[in-house]
Image (spheres, grey):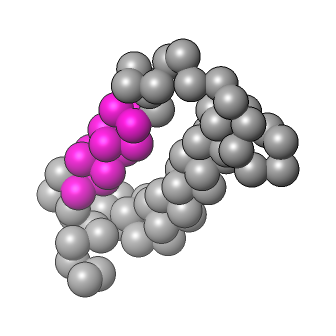
């Protein structure tokens, strides 16, 4: 697993997938309340931000090291 986390292609795919999920063209007109009375998009963005935090944390831990990551 650590070998996969040192691959630049894994990180390119992971951040690209998160970017594509953030476009949200499939629910533009969805605005009714869902969680705690907040609109759907607020909950969705909060989940995406949590995923982005996890990706940045893992990226800094496994790829962005002193040796510059794997080739």
Residue 36 at x, y percent in the picture: 83, 50
Drawn side of residue 1 relative to residue 21, left or right: left
Please name the residue shown 53% across and 55% down the image.
Answer: 51
Drawn side of residue 45 relative to residue 27, left or right: right
Residue 5 at x, y percent in the picture: 30, 70
Identify which residue, 57 or 70, lies in the foreground.
57
Is residue 31 shown above or below 66?
Answer: above
Identify which residue, 56 or 64, lies in the foreground.
56
Considering the image in quadrants, where does the N terminus appear?
bottom left
Residue 49 seen in this snapshot? no
Drawn side of residue 69 relative to residue 52, left or right: left
Residue 6 at x, y percent in the picture: 27, 68
Examine the structure image and report whether residue 20 is included in the region drawn in magenta: yes
Residue 25 position by quadrant:
top left
Q: Is the magenta stretch mostly helix, strand or loop?
A: helix
Residue 13 at x, y percent in the picture: 24, 47
Identify which residue, 46 or 52, lies in the foreground.
46
Is residue 34 shown above or below 22?
Answer: below
Of all residues, the one furthest to the top in this rendering is 29
Is residue 1 shown above or below 25?
Answer: below
Residue 43 position by quadrant:
top right
Please name the residue shown 37% across and 63% down the image.
Answer: 63
- Residue range in magenta is 10-21
Of all residues, the one furthest to the bottom in this rendering is 1
Please name the residue shown 74% across and 50% down the image.
Answer: 35
Please name the residue shown 64% across and 36% down the image.
Answer: 40
Is residue 25 shown above or below 60?
Answer: above
Residue 12 seen in this snapshot? yes
Q: Please count the marks in the image.
A: 0
Considering the image in quadrants, where does the C terminus appear?
bottom left
Examine the structure image and report whether residue 19 is included in the region drawn in magenta: yes
Identify which residue, 1 or 26, lies in the foreground.
26
């Amino acid at each position: 697993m650590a070998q996969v986390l040192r691959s630049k292609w894994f990180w390119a795919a992971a951040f690209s997938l998160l970017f594509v999920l953030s476009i949200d063209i499939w629910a533009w007109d969805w605005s009714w309340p869902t969680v705690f009375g907040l609109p759907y998009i607020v909950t969705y963005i909060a989940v995406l931000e949590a995923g982005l935090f996890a990706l940045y944390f893992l990226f800094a831990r496994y790829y962005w090291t002193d040796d510059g990551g794997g080739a």
